[in-house]
Image (cartoon, grey):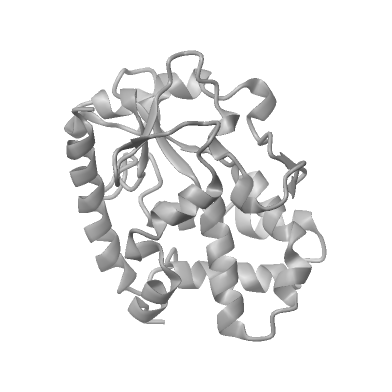
Amino acid sequence: MKFIDLHKKDYLNCVDIIRKRMLKNLRDHPISFIDFMRTSLNEASNYHEFKRELGGPNNRVRHAHDFYGWMSKDGAWGACRGAFYRSENYMKIALENRSGKKRDKDEDFGVHIEHTIPVDVILKSIWHCRETFKSISNDQVLQKKLYENFLSLSVCTAITRNEEKTCVPILYRSEHPDFSNGQLFNIATLNEVLPFKRYNFESELRLFEVINGTEISPEHWSLKDHFELMNEMNIYDWNYVSRSSCF
């Protein structure tokens, strides 16, 4: 795949930006986000309150994803530059032409960040495990567990605007086939979840991860694979995040 090396370089340039952002006291910093999630998990009396805090008007979840460049909006780390999962068609767009602007949504160079596991499913899954999290008395351990759980579910894929219209069946617009109301559906652990099983590959959708250049097989690529891939980059490691933080 002739685009992989170019897009790996593009991704690594974004990683350098994120490393610099990690040193700043920012509202969307992972430490700030996890503190907010922990407080919300403790104070919310039901899921709807929890969702309103994390995914409401301020949408802290999406801001947490934005921090890592998992966003289509413009900016030095925008236009999906932080996405290590990318479609072949996304990678065919000239890097300098990528646009996540709404006015360009019908253009061939329009790009979109797809939350492969929808935000609603992420929040329901974390809420479902709230008693387990609340039982952790060591605050540092709790922060790490919350962070790793959130990131293991945060599979964000760079695709084109045209692919956005066809890659997700209507049935799964805000759902995922391995979850039922946030709970695992007929599988034993999160590691077994197949995040890309949600997509329709009949329209010749092809996805790659640019860290090693592997093409994604939707029937085999699991959250275990996802987490192991992230572990190759220290910016996603909690120990690195907490050491770099100025909080």
Estimate the x, y position of residue 204 in percent, counting from the top left. 43, 15
The residue sitting at 82% across, 66% down in the picture is 45
Quadrant of image for the C terminus: bottom left
Please say whether residue 69 is visible from this viewpoint: yes
Estimate the x, y position of residue 173 in percent, counting from the top left. 63, 29
Q: Residue furthest bottom?
A: 138
Q: Residue furthest top?
A: 203
Please say whether residue 60 is visible from this viewpoint: no
Q: Is residue 154 left or right of residue 88?
A: right
The residue sitting at 36% across, 80% down in the picture is 243
Estimate the x, y position of residue 60 in percent, counting from the top left. 54, 58
Quadrant of image for the N terminus: top left
Q: Is residue 189 left or right of residue 245?
A: right
Q: Quadrant of residue 22?
A: bottom left
Q: Is residue 119 left or right of residue 29?
A: right
Residue situated in front as seen by the camera: 242 or 109: 242
Q: Quadrant of residue 103?
A: top left
The residue sitting at 38% across, 55% down in the picture is 68
The residue sitting at 39% across, 72% down in the picture is 241
In the image, residue 173 above or below residue 166: below
What is the count of numbered marks? Answer: 0
